[in-house]
Image (cartoon, rainbow, N blue to C red):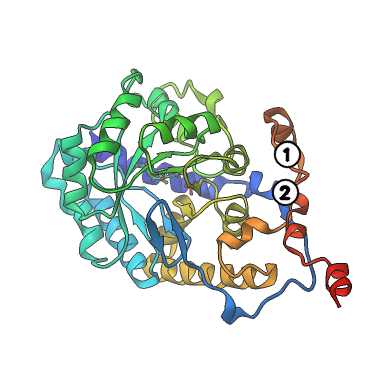
Amino acid sequence: MIAQRKDDHVRLAVEQQQQHDGRNQFDEVSFVHHALAGLDRTDVSLTTAFGGISWQVPLYINAMTGGSERTGAINRDLAVAAHETGVPIASGSMSAYFKDPDCADTFSVLRKENPDGFVIANVNATTSVDNALRAVDLIQADALQIHVNTVQETVMPEGDRSFSSWVPQIERIAAGAGVPVIVKEVGFGLSRETVRLLAGLGVRVADLGGRGGTDFARIENGRRELADYAYLTGWGQSTAACLLDAQDAPIPVLASGGVRQPLDVARALALGASGVGVSGTFLRTLLDGGVAALIAQISTWLDQLAALLTVLGARTPAALRHSDLLIHGELRDFCADRGIDIRSLARRSGSLDVPHETTGNTR
Ligand SMILES: Cc1cc2nc3c(=O)[nH]c(=O)nc-3n(C[C@H](O)[C@H](O)[C@H](O)COP(=O)(O)O)c2cc1C
């Protein structure tokens, strides 16, 4: 049952990628261009550090799969790509392993092919602490993701219908996992209120997992006989909206959901993300062009991300948080309604300038 669902998810996610019109709310975020802000490329480093975690690059392959023969082969290729490019990688949900230990290899391949990489285990919010520890142990994980996905479960024909145990269970897992815990949405977004709640539960990092890419309401609706939840397509907050909403978050945030190219990575970092996760875009590349195509794509993204930081005058991903950003369209309305100050975002680099008169006056 789980193996079939995993194969369905891959098929429907790739179909969705092929049908996507290519637009999302990252298009409503632009950088103010400063023509003389540029640095030397050699001055730029892509390293990022957050919540006790350090990565060489602020880009990661986010949770997708495992649990069936086909998805085990996909995990092998994703792990090879992570190893070759140095990006961290998250496993798909490891529930299948708890139900059927025979599928362990479809997950442990993530560590086998990527012995020194940063690997993240993935469980749901009803997992016992013992099983969370088994998941971490199986792939020698450096961190653990707990996915929260009430909308997906609701539309999924065989999904959960009870969610009230999730908050106390997340707290138990965060206390007992032995590695940093990241809570992630799967494409509907974490609100600022949710991020604050998670911080109080001992969760180290929040992956905002917003709308704009893979839509699991649509995927699960495609698995329903009557397809009668079509009206939930597009539910939730976009990733850009989540980042704006979480400007004053008490824990570091990661961004994922609808990341299409290196400019989206730069936009997300400028909006406060410590790292940026990609699933659907990379899955499509892998299935269309094979592992060599995925390695080439990730390498190009990292190269172009460094190029963008060079143009924008940011020595590190964190320095992008001082770049001037313009917010347009519906995203602007969202900010107005949620009380988010976008005027200061548009002029924040000025606070770094040494005023010209000051230099003159002290002579
Ligand atoms: C085929 C597929 C399977 C997925 N399975 C999982 C999963 O098991 N656990 C999880 O936390 N997220 C899962 N996701 C969600 C992704 O991690 C991510 O949150 C979501 O796809 C939005 O990112 P994207 O727009 O880059 O695809 C899956 C995504 C895809 C495409």
The kind of secondary structure element at disc 2 is helix
**Residue 244 falls left or right of residue 336:** left
Choose between 165 and 70: the one closer to the eye: 165
Query: Can you see residue 193?
Result: yes
Q: Could you tell me if the residues under marks 1 and 2 are in contact, i.e. CB atoms within 8 Å?
A: yes
Disc 1 versus disc 2: distance between alpha carbons? 7 Å
Give coordinates of residue 131: x percent, y percent.
17, 38
Q: In this figure, which residue is indicated by the disc labeled 1?
A: 341
Query: On screen, 19 above or below 1?
Result: below
- At a point 24% along the width and 66% down the height, the residue shown is 113
Query: On screen, 218 above or below 272?
Result: above
Q: Residues within 10 Å of mark 1 (few under 14, many from 20)?
A: few
Quadrant for the C terminus in the image: bottom right
Q: In this figure, which residue is indicated by the disc labeled 2?
A: 345
Quarter of the rendering containing residue 99: top left
The amino acid marked with disc number 1 is Asp
The amino acid marked with disc number 2 is Leu
